[in-house]
Image (cartoon, rainbow, N blue to C red):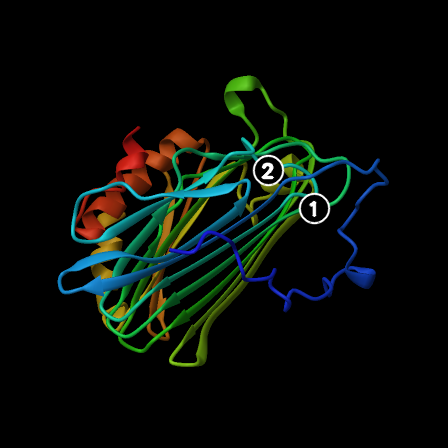
Amino acid sequence: MATTFAASWRSDSGPDPRSAEGASPAATSAPARQRSEGRVRIAATAFGAVTRVSDLAEGGALRVRVPRGGTGLEAVIVNTAGGVCCGDRFAIAASAGPGAHLTISTPAAEKVYRSDGPLAEINVDLVADEGARLEWLPQETILFDRARLRRRYAVELAPSASFLSFEALMLGRLAHGDAMGEGHVEDHWRISRGGALVYADAFRLSGPLAQVLARPTVAAGNRAMATLLFVAPEAESRLEEARGLLADIPCEAGASAWNGLLAVRWLAGDIATLRRAASSFLMAFRKAPLPRVWAT
C-alpha cells in the first residue's frame, strides 16, 4: 500500500475558453492566503467474488476510509479541511480493476464557502476495466453565497464496465435565510467508453445566481438540482424502468437514454425534498441500499 501520492495535478485543464488567459470569471483582487490542497488515489481489485484495496495514496487535506464488510468495496472520501474555499485544489483518482466493484462516497455534504478571489477546483479521474462496476455517489454539495467552484470529471470505461454517478447541488442555505447573491459554479463531464467519447457536458452558472435560477428556462426558482448518469451495456434498455421510478415524486424530474447511457435529472425547491426523491430512486434502481455513510 502506497504512502505518498505520486500522481500530479491533471495537466489537461488548460485555460478556460470563456475567459482570457484562463482567469477565473469575475474574479476580484484578493490578498494571498494559504489554501488547502488534497489528493487521493485508490485502486480496487477483485479477488474472486470479493473486492479489496490494491493501492491507496493520500496527501494534504483528503483522506480515504474503507468500512469493512460486504463483497464490494466502499471508499469514503474525507475532506479534513472542513469544506472548500477560494483557491483550494483537490484531486481524486479511482480505478476499479477487471470484475471489481467500487463505490465512492462522502461522509456528509460538502460545503463550498464564500470566495473573494480565485475559483476552488476539484478534479476527479475515474477508470473502470472490463466487467468492473464503479459508482460515484457523494452526498450533496452546498454552495454558500458568493462561492466560486469549478469541477472537472474524466471517466474512462471498458466496453463491458458499468458506471453510475449521482451529483446533487444546493445553491444557498434556506434554513439560514441565505439569499444566494453573486456566485459561480461549473461542472465539466467527459465520459469515454472503449476509447470513444460517449458523453460530454458543461454546466455553468455565474453572476447573480438567485436571479439566474428564477428564470423559467433555467430552474424556475428551484435551488436544488441533481444529475444521475448510468453507462453500461444495458443502460438504454432501463429507460422505462427509470421513468416509472420517477412517477409521483414531489419534485420535477426526467429521464432520457442515448448512446449507451441513461441520464436522470431532478429539480426541487430544497435539498431535503430532492434527497428524499433521489434516495428512493437510487435504492430501487441500484437494487441495493445506499452507502452506509448516507444514513449517518
Q: Earlier in the sequence, mark 2 or mark 1?
A: 2
Label 1 packing within 10 angstroms: few (<14), some (14-19), many (20+): many
Where is residue 108? Give x, y as percent: 41, 33
Q: Which residue is mark 1?
A: 119
Please tell me whether mark 1 sits on a helix, a strand or a loop.
loop
Question: What residue is shown at x 37% (from left), y 48% (from top)?
Answer: 253
Query: Which one is in front, 85 or 168?
Result: 85
Where is residue 125? Give x, y as percent: 48, 61
Where is residue 171? Give x, y as percent: 56, 35
Residue lying at the far left of the rendered structure: 49
Location of the C terminus by quadrant is: top left
Where is residue 292? Give x, y as percent: 26, 37
Q: Amino acid at mark 2?
A: Val
Q: How many marks?
A: 2
Q: Amino acid at mark 1?
A: Leu
Give the side of residue 263 with respect to residue 67, left or right: right
Give the side of residue 70 with respect to residue 96, left or right: left
Label 2 packing within 10 angstroms: few (<14), some (14-19), many (20+): many
Q: Is residue 235 visible?
A: yes
Q: Which residue is mark 2?
A: 84
Q: Is residue 176 above or below residue 210?
A: above
Residue lying at the far top of the rendered structure: 176
Question: What residue is shown at x 65% (from left), y 31% (from top)?
Answer: 145
Q: Is residue 39 above or below residue 65?
A: below
Please tell me whether mark 2 sits on a helix, a strand or a loop.
loop
The part of the image, by quadrant, that contains residue 6 is bottom right
Query: Which one is in front, 170 or 157?
Result: 157
Question: What residue is shown at x 54% (from left), y 31% (from top)?
Answer: 82
Q: Work out how far the residue at label 2 is from the one at label 1, CA to CA, in angstroms.
A: 10 Å
The part of the image, by quadrant, that contains residue 87 is top right
Q: Is residue 247 visible?
A: no
Query: Which one is in front, 91 or 108?
Result: 91
